[in-house]
Amino acid sequence: MTARRNRLAPVGPFLIILALATLLPLKGLAAPYAAMVMDARTGEVLHSENADARLHPASLTKMMTLYIAFTAVRNGEISLDDDIRISRHAASEPPSKLGLQSGQKIKFRYLIRAAAVKSANDAATAIGEAIAGSEAAFARRMTDTARALGMTRTTFKNAHGLTEEGHLSTAHDMTVLGRHLLFDFPEYYNIFSRQSTYAGIREVANTNRRLLAAYKGADGIKTGYTRAAGFNLVSSAKRGNERIIATVFGGRSSASRNAKIAELLDLGFKRAPSHAPVQAPSAPVYAAADASGGSLSSGKTIRLQTAVKASLRPKMRPGGTSPATGPEAIPTNLVAVAMTEVIEATVAEVQEETVQLAGIGTVAPKARPEELEVVTRVSTSGGRHWGINVGRYPSEYKAERVLLQTALNEMSTLDGSLRKVVRKPTGFDANFLGLTRETADLACRRLQARNQTCFMIGPAS
């Protein structure tokens, strides 16, 4: 018996050595590292390492899912209060998930919260299906939108970011997307800084809560992890006049990833100038999804805008005929150029205020008891004394933006009117003034037919 034990004794150390030899090569299988640091105000790259390598984005993907969700709500494709029926496909997504059940109905706003804060895969898939009809169609729209934003090395195959062949992005492209979320949807951006939120079924905690709590000025944006991707993060922080966006791909753990992103943010604040002009990125022109399932046609209906090369007002046709009116007559680059001017003039205030839109946020705007009128266009209204109100909004910026979008969408009745933002104790009224009664009535009826808030303002109002 003793001899038998002696013959077996060397096996123990041999197995240990074999196990170590097997494990050591795993270090080489770690996800590739990539990083980028950008001055959010100007888009200047402050640091870059392997930033153009196409890697697995993991749940950073949900930044694009949310970007399209915000776009769809803003443009009336879907409402935050729409009840979304959960498909078997969405309910079957693996964790992280909210726990949605097939056939269940849940409001769209809760899907947004769950995807943004909890990083729930089932919620992300449900968002895509609700907007585009299928996840495949939504993925095509995601890729089209990426191209429109300048994300040239990104291709999406799903709405959640779980590893799939061909589903790839870069640290550079995800940094660009983070900047667009900040500038294009300031009214929604505060959702990324919440430590927790109610998502219709239960309260969910933010996957980024440790960095939000530990790093001064951090207010977003999105974490991601899969075995193929490693620990990823796009983060933004604001200190004084400076705002930095930093991205990490391929972190070894959530703790090391957070430490690295803090190091990169520190580097950004060190290198960025104290004062820099805000140069908002060009937002793509919105185009509604086509009838074939929600995808946008390969970069043809959403595109980046460049400088204005011609007058923004349609020219008179030969013979004095009035120019064509309606959305089809609006130059394709008019919305983005004009909106960029508004953003540049007001972004400093927007970044200081946390605002809400249609109940996603619950933080009230700063109280200003006085009533102040802000004129945003020279009047050509003559003696017309009627007007319309198109809503009350939590910030001056939002009211101005709605006025601009409404004027462009309803040019035939509102051309030549006076746009005014009127500051009230409870918000900012967006008004068009200098209309005849008939024109005001027609404008409201046309806007209400598109489900936009509108009521007439009489001469004594």
Image (cartoon, helix red, strand yellow):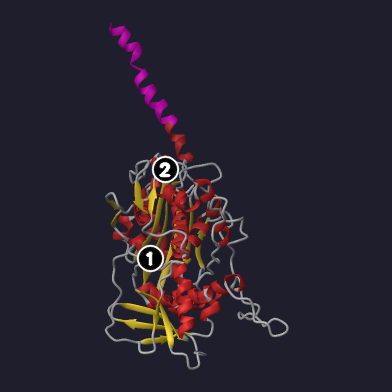
Placement of the C terminus among the 4 image quadrants = bottom left
The residue lying at 53 percent from left, 75 percent from top is 408
Instruction: Report the mark closest to the observer, 1 or 2.
Output: 2
Left or right position of 423 against 279 = left
Could you say where residue 230 lies in the image, as x and y percent from the top left?
44, 46
Q: CA distance from mark 1 to mark 2?
A: 37 Å
User: Crowdedness of circle 1 by 10 Å Cα count: few (<14), some, many (20+)?
Assistant: many
Give the image quarter of residue 441. bottom left
User: Crowdedness of circle 2 by 10 Å Cα count: few (<14), some, many (20+)?
Assistant: some
Residue 87 numbered mark, or none:
2
Could one spot residue 231 in this view of the protein?
Answer: no
- In terms of secondary structure, what is the magenta stretch mainly? helix
Is 265 above or below relative to 15?
A: below
Placement of the N terminus among the 4 image quadrants = top left
Query: Circle 2 — which element?
Result: loop
Q: Which residue is mark 1?
A: 237
Residue 9 is a magenta residue: yes
Closer to the camera in the image, 373 or 211: 373
The residue lying at 28 percent from left, 49 percent from top is 201
| Label tally | 2
Closer to the camera in the image, 391 or 154: 391
Could you say where residue 423 lies in the image, as x and y percent from the top left?
34, 82
Is 293 above or below relative to 181?
A: above
Could you say where residue 412 lies in the image, as x and y percent from the top left?
55, 78
Identify the magenta region. Answer: 1-22
Could you say where residue 210 lies in the image, as x and y percent from the top left?
30, 55
Is 379 above or below relative to 253?
A: below
